[in-house]
Image (cartoon, grey):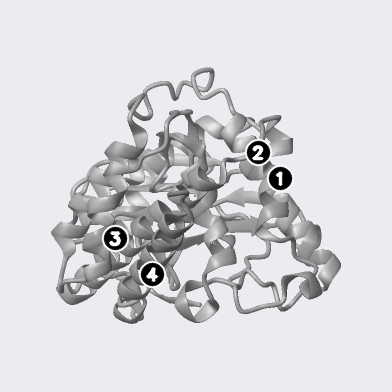
């Protein structure tokens, strides 16, 4: 669905004319609805389609909406085996359209919103999720230093820094007390697993952040790299495996479904396939539960930020307030899992 852009299209056209190698005449600009973060627009020229992603206007949380990082990582990953759209140009001059932005190729394909994939057959569902698994394993095995991304994140203490960062982001956007968030904020820093592997992590690996080939079960672009960095790969994996733990009502999950009847793997089978692809041993169950709890905590903090932007009038989606209010639900589910983990620990 597209809506009016609200951008200074004359200023944008002048910039594109000067900076695009393949400028295709004055572009029509339409906003894409659906995202909760960086406003996204389709640019249509003569025989050409592009996508523009920009920072939202207004006051923003520190380090949020980093379109410059999105542009850098998709530029570096081109040709790496990780499918990304081709980056075209980046503009850090807020005077052009109000905030920094970047432009990339428009990728034509299929985008799925429901992880249970109701529009597909059981065989197709299995192939789609196996492809997702393959691409994540590829991303986590990329030699980031060889791609010029050795300084894309700070080495060491990734989980401690992430917990501190998302606690700070949550506090900055807090609108009410959520008791389970308080418990997670206390428990997580004290229970970080040993080990600190480093890989490129996407940060928002959901089925709706992928573009699939129009007819093949093949990912042609991983989208929305705003939260990407260098860090521990298991939280990145856990963030999208939350789909197995959450229902569609709670947040874009599929826990209410009978997965074998849909042709979908169990959570355990999915993790085993990922480990096989990376040539690593099985993930320790207690460590995995920590990463799952952290990922849900992080999602709740992100959702709380959406609530704050909606209340401040800076949200890029009209349903932002409704979506954001699920922060409490996700925090409650996360803490229930921590309680189960504690109950299962040997005395």
Residue labelled with disc 3: 301
Of circles 2 and 1, which is in front? 2
Q: Secondary structure at mark 2?
A: loop
Foreground of the two, 30 or 183: 183
Numbered badge on residue 272: 1
* Of pointers 1 and 4, the one earlier in the residue sequence: 1
**Proximity of marks 3 and 1: CB atoms separated by less than 8 Å:** no
Counting other residues with Cα less than 10 Å from the Cα at mark 1, is it few (<14), some (14-19), or many (20 or more)?
A: some
Q: Measuring 28% from the left and 51% from the top, which residue is drawn there? A: 187
Residue labelled with disc 2: 282
| Residue 125 visible at all | yes
**Proximity of marks 3 and 4: CB atoms separated by less than 8 Å:** no
* Of pointers 3 and 4, the one earlier in the residue sequence: 3
| Number of numbered discs on residues | 4
Counting other residues with Cα less than 10 Å from the Cα at mark 3, is it few (<14), some (14-19), or many (20 or more)?
A: many
Q: Measuring 72% from the left and 36% from the top, which residue is drawn there? A: 277
Q: Position of residue 215 (x, y in %)?
A: 80, 62
Residue labelled with disc 4: 330
Of circles 3 and 4, which is in front? 4
Foreground of the two, 1 or 198: 198
* Alpha-carbon span between mark 1 and mark 4: 26 Å
* Alpha-carbon span between mark 3 and mark 1: 29 Å
* Alpha-carbon span between mark 3 and mark 2: 29 Å
* Of pointers 3 and 2, the one earlier in the residue sequence: 2
| Residue 219 visible at all | no
Q: Secondary structure at mark 3?
A: helix
Counting other residues with Cα less than 10 Å from the Cα at mark 2, is it few (<14), some (14-19), or many (20 or more)?
A: few
Numbered badge on residue 306: none
Q: Quadrant of residue 22?
A: top right
Q: Measuring 51% from the left and 42% from the top, which residue is drawn there? A: 234
**Proximity of marks 2 and 1: CB atoms separated by less than 8 Å:** yes
């Amino acid at each position: 669905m597209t809506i009016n852009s609200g951008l200074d299209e004359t200023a944008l056209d002048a910039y594109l004319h000067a900076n695009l190698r393949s400028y295709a005449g004055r572009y029509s600009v339409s906003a894409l609805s659906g995202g909760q973060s960086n406003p996204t627009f389709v640019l249509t020229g003569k025989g050409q389609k592009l996508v523009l992603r920009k920072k939202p206007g207004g006051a923003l949380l520190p380090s949020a909406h980093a379109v410059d990082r999105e542009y850098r990582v998709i530029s570096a990953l081109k040709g790496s085996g990780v499918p990304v759209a081709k980056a075209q140009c980046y503009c850090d001059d807020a005077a052009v359209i109000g905030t920094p932005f970047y432009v990339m190729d428009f990728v034509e394909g299929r985008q799925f919103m429901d992880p249970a994939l109701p529009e597909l057959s059981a065989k197709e569902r299995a192939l789609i999720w196996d492809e997702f698994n393959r691409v994540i394993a590829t991303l986590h095995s990329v030699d980031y230093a060889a791609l010029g991304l050795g300084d894309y994140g700070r080495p060491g203490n990734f989980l401690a820094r992430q917990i501190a960062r998302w606690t700070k982001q949550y506090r900055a956007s807090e609108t009410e007390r959520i008791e389970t968030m308080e418990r997670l904020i206390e428990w997580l820093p004290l229970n970080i697993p040993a080990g600190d592997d480093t890989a490129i992590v996407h940060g928002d690996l959901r089925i709706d952040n992928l573009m699939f080939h129009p007819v093949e079960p093949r990912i042609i672009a991983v989208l929305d790299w705003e939260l990407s960095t260098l860090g521990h790969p298991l939280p990145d994996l856990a963030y999208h495996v939350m789909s197995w733990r959450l229902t569609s009502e709670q947040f874009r999950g599929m826990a209410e479904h009978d997965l074998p009847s849909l042709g979908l793997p169990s959570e355990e089978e999915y993790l085993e396939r990922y480990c096989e692809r990376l040539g690593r041993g099985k993930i320790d169950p207690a460590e995995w539960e920590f990463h799952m709890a952290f990922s849900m905590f992080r999602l709740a903090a992100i959702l709380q930020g959406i609530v704050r932007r909606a209340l401040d009038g800076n949200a890029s989606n009209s349903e932002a307030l409704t979506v954001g209010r699920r922060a409490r639900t996700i925090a409650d589910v996360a803490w229930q899992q921590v309680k189960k983990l504690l109950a299962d620990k040997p005395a």
